[in-house]
């Protein structure tokens, strides 16, 4: 019996885990960085309030020294400092949802602080707002915000340092601060890219899981179809032979006891053969070692050399069967021999089921270098009216022929019987993905 040995897919076990998403990363350092980034993102998604409140609180802490000085009487006074700190820090709570508006508010508040010639320490809120602009805004919006931030930073550098440093020193400070502002915006863009990469990895992992499940379901369906086809071939043919022999033996038990006893022995042999084949099939499907015991030894799948025994069983049931072979079928691949054997078996089973016991059957097998052609023709008459072209047996024959790039046609012939023609291509033999039990 044959069993598919398809490779087990190396699909992810659960989407979103570091092991799943890092399956294609080879460098250990890159994997460590990505693993850390994914853990940070997972923590952020699990506790969004932490990131939302952390930045406003940090900026507010930067303003504590200025608030203490204002409380001690420094200009512009504690109420103004509290208002400016709140205007700078509170908008950061909505920096992810409204990055442009948040940047605009914090920039305007920073201009007020600059106009009052003071420092609150909370101006870092403008930098945090610019970082989120880089993470989510469109390129044009980002460019405008970066230009505004650089201009404002340069103006503040000249305004605050012109009385303490030379012009050249002030220019250097302004350039350095402008570069820092640009670096903050670039960091936001990098964060956006990293976030998109992590999301893409998660989507890829989810897609791989879906593909793995689809492959598993397809493999299970293919295996069920194969088992159903094999069981249909085994049981359908054997039961048809047994029914035909039993009908003949019933009339011979009184008139010709010896022939009746011979028919009963053939029935017993056919039943034992079918039982052995079913055991082999179930042993392969279930990997059951008990089913491969000495009372049911495993044997190769039937081939063209086994056609004689098949035809003898059919002849014992009544029909006269002749076989004519052209070419050299002995050199055909075992899988192709099995396919031809099963097609002949199914065609003879249909003859036993639907034709009179007195029918005659002619089988012709033609083998050449490119293909195998098979014709099974009986003379009828048909005992069961109607067309059997949609039966499970004919579907199974077509599937077997399709594996070898061929096809099967069937229909009534001009002799009152039924003709099956099958065509198999030698050049399209399937890859050796099966193992044989011997």
Image (cartoon, rainbow, N blue to C red):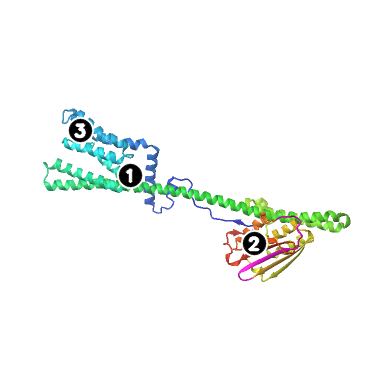
Span of residues in magenta: 368-386
The residue positioned 86% from the left and 54% from the top of the image is 253
Whether residue 60 is visible, yes or no, is: yes
Q: Are circles 2 and 3 on residues that touch, CB within 8 Å?
A: no
Image side of residue 333 versus residue 114, left or right: right
Nearer mark to the viewer, of 1 and 3? 1
Query: Tag 1, which secondary structure?
Result: helix
Determine which quarter of the picture holds residue 394.
bottom right
Q: Position of residue 182 (x, y in %)?
A: 25, 47
Nearer mark to the viewer, of 2 and 3? 2
Nearer mark to the viewer, of 1 and 2? 2
Q: Position of residue 88 (x, y in %)?
A: 25, 35
When the figure is inspected, residue 243 is found, relative to residue 372, above or below; the finding is above
Of callouts 1 and 2, the N-terminal one: 1
Based on the picture, tell me whether residue 111 belongs to the magenta stretch: no
Q: Label 3: which residue?
A: 66
Q: CA distance from mark 1 to mark 2?
A: 61 Å
**Total labels drawn:** 3
Determine which quarter of the picture holds residue 75.
top left
Of callouts 2 and 3, the N-terminal one: 3
What number is the disc on residue 408? Answer: 2
Which quarter of the rendering shows the C terminus?
Answer: bottom right
Q: Label 1: which residue?
A: 136
The residue positioned 69% from the left and 65% from the top of the image is 375
């Amino acid at each position: 019996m044959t069993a598919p040995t398809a490779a087990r897919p190396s699909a992810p076990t659960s989407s979103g885990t570091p092991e799943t998403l890092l399956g294609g990363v080879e460098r250990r350092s890159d994997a460590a960085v990505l693993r850390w980034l994914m853990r940070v993102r997972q923590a952020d998604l699990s506790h969004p309030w932490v990131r939302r409140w952390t930045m406003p609180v940090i900026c507010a802490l930067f303003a504590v020294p200025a608030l203490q000085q204002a409380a001690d009487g420094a200009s512009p006074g504690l109420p103004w400092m509290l208002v400016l700190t709140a205007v700078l820090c509170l908008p950061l709570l909505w920096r992810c949802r409204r990055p442009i508006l948040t940047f605009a508010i914090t920039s305007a508040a920073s201009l007020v602080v600059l106009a009052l010639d003071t420092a609150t320490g909370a101006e870092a809120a403008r930098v945090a707002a610019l970082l989120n602009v880089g993470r989510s805004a469109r390129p044009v919006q980002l460019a405008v915000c970066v230009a505004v931030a650089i201009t404002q930073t340069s103006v503040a550098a000249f305004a605050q340092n012109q009385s303490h440093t030379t012009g050249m020193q002030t220019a250097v400070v302004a350039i350095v601060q402008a570069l820092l502002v640009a670096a903050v915006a670039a960091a936001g863009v990098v964060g956006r890219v990293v976030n998109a990469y992590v999301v893409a990895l998660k989507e890829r992992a989810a897609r791989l899981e879906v593909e793995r499940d689809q492959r598993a379901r397809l493999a299970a369906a293919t295996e069920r179809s194969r088992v159903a086809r094999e069981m249909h071939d085994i049981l359908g043919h054997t039961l048809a032979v047994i029914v035909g022999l039993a009908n003949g033996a019933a009339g011979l038990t009184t008139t010709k006891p010896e022939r009746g006893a011979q028919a009963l022995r053939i029935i017993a042999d056919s039943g034992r053969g079918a039982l052995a084949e079913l055991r082999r099939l179930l042993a392969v499907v279930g990997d059951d070692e008990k089913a491969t015991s000495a009372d049911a030894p495993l044997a190769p799948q039937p081939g063209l050399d086994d056609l004689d025994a098949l035809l003898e069983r059919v002849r014992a049931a009544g029909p006269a069967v002749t076989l004519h072979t052209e070419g050299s079928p002995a050199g055909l691949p075992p899988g192709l021999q099995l396919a031809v054997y099963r097609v002949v078996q199914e065609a003879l089973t249909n003859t036993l089921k639907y034709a009179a016991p007195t029918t005659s059957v002619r089988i012709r097998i033609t083998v050449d270098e490119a293909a195998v052609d098979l014709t099974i023709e009986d003379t009828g008459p048909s005992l069961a009216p109607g067309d059997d072209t949609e039966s499970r047996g004919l579907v199974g024959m077509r599937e077997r022929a399709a594996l070898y790039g061929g096809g099967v046609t069937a229909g009534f012939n001009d002799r009152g019987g039924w003709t099956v023609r099958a065509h198999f291509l030698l050049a399209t033999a399937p890859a050796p993905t099966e193992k044989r039990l011997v």
